[in-house]
Image (tube, rainbow, N blue to C red):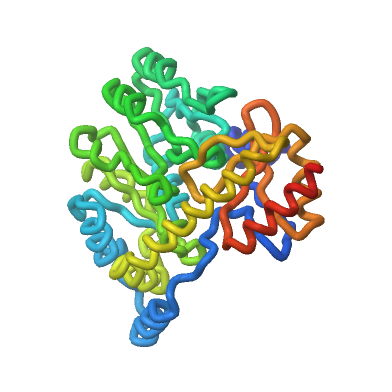
Amino acid sequence: MSAITRRLLRPEMGDVASYATSTATAPIRLDRNESPEEMPQATREKVLASLAAARWSRYPDPYASELKRALALREGVSTASVIVGNGSNSLLLSFFLAAAFPGRRIGICPPTFGLYASWARAAGCGVQSFPLAEEDLAPPAGEMVAAARRDPDLAFVLCSPNNPTGTLFPREGLVSLLETGALVVLDEAYIEFSGGSARDLLPGHPNLLISRTLSKAAALAGVRVGYMLGDPALLSEIEKVVPPFSVNLFARAAALAVLADESPARERVAAIVAERRRVARALAGEPHARLTESHANFLFLRPERPAEDLFERLLSRGILVRRVAGTKRGALRVTIGRPEENDRFLEAWREATS
């Protein structure tokens, strides 16, 4: 950051990393954790019919009340316990804006989603890292609890299943952390692929917020709809910095359509989980793949060879995966695609590591 820029903007912006995504492309893309399948054609037509009947020249309800009601019904909470936004990332940014104050620190467990640290710093918070263990990728829950007891201003942003490792934050550790009174945001973007959620902890813990998305399991990555669950008093304050009308007409129509019938999404998730297990079994027999059990729609590979080299070798074979941080050195994150795409990845992996 230049001296002029530092004078004109928040000085902390010099320490904020941009969101990085590859500009490469390939016939088979396994780099963005997207759904390999679209929503059913009948559902798409329902969305388009809804848009044809809508008035595009008028602002919709500022806070998407109809969508809130549908999500509240889905999650078994009150409407006041839900806020919605233009993807879950936008709600996390609103959280940082609402929660930041001088001296506040945000605890994270790297390697994890890169925007947590960047946006915490951009909002003026400090960042305290509690790295995952090298062997089993477990978070140091005891250390985190002790730190929360020492510092009442320490808040946590956790991802479970974690991106990029696919591992879960242990429930007993989460409960212990909440019992310190610390503010905890739990990002459950991939929760449908794991079979478990911390949603049942909400009634007894007003210091817990849960972030969710329709991008992954619901196959709406291009639509951008996210939501946050939590104590109504806490959410009402965060919603003050959620831009009104942030969920547009198309996003509302698409979200309501998939929520009206979630059976296709459940079938899609089951197919992805089955493929994840199949690909993991195949990789477990390979000598160059260090693999940890994933509970998301991707696999986390810590290869013996440099991840950058394997990334290029796969790309030259038409397979695009994601280079991510590991515990000690670079790793690869591989989205689960269609069966034929996964087969081609396995073939390319064997060629690249031979």
Q: Residue at x 55, y 54 (%)?
A: 33
| Side of 109 relative to 285 (left or right) | left
Residue beneath the point at 37% across and 23% down: 153
Residue 287 shows in this picture? yes
Quadrant of the image containing the N terminus:
top right
Residue that appears at 68% across and 54% down: 345
Between 301 and 110, which is closer to the camera in this rendering?
301
Residue shown at 49% from the left, 30% from the top: 108
Can residue 86 be seen at all in this image of the molecule? no
The image shows residue 308 at horizontal and vertical percentages of: 77, 41
Residue 221, percent from left and from top = 50, 61
Residue farthest to the front?
A: 285
Q: Position of residue 219 (x, y in %)?
A: 46, 63
Direction from residue 183 to residue 295 in the image, left or right: right
- Asked if residue 72 lies left or right of residue 126, the reply is left
* Residue 56 image position (x, y, % from top left): 40, 81
Q: Is residue 283 above or below residue 44?
A: above
Foreground of the two, 289 or 103:
289
Q: Quadrant of residue 16?
A: top right
The image shows a total of numbered marks equal to 0
Residue 256 vertical placement versus 73 (above, below): below
For the C terminus, the quadrant is top right
Front one among 286 and 230: 286
Quarter of the image for residue 4 reads top right
